[in-house]
Amino acid sequence: MSKQTRRKFKGDFKSKVVLEALKERSTTEELAKKYELHPNQINTWKKEFLSKAASVFDEKASDADKAREADIENLYAKIGQLKVENDFLKKKLS
């Protein structure tokens, strides 16, 4: 008796199948035959993809905001340091 192993699919394959399913040029059953999958699997991937679609843009925006805030904080720190050095040098010249 042979033991069947579960097939594992990479993200690029899943996204390719889901995007093709979202185009609706062919039915889920046709895609299932084409990619040798069960139609329920395609529908599951499609639901997961759609539920996480909005978070893709939110994460990028928050990462960009965090990076921008860190840059601003570094710049303010540098400005403060330069102001202290400038004031010190003014006192020494007087």
Image: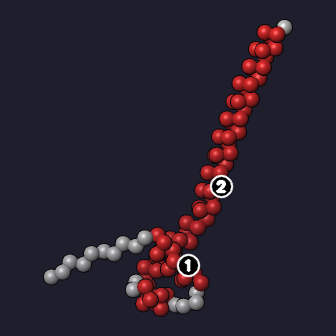
Q: What's the residue at 52%, 90% (across, down)?
A: 27
Circle number at residue 61: 2
Residue 26 x/y as whole percent:
54, 91
User: Mark 2 is on which residue type?
Assistant: Ala
Image disc number at residue 19: 1
Dot 2 lies on which element?
Answer: helix
- How far apart are the two marked residues, 1 and 2, measured between alpha carbons? 23 Å
Helix, strand or loop under label 1? helix
Q: Nearer the viewer, residue 76 or 94?
A: 94
The x, y position of residue 29, in whole percent, is 46, 90
Horizontal side of 21 relative to 77 (left or right) equals left
Q: Residue at x 44, y 89 (%)?
A: 34
Question: Furthest-front residue in view?
Answer: 93
- Three-letter code, disc 1: Leu
Tell me residue 78's x, y (percent).
Answer: 70, 30
Residue 44 in the figure: left or right of residue 51: left
Whether tag 1 and tag 2 are in contact, CB under 8 A, the answer is: no
Q: Residue at x 51, y 74 (%)?
A: 15
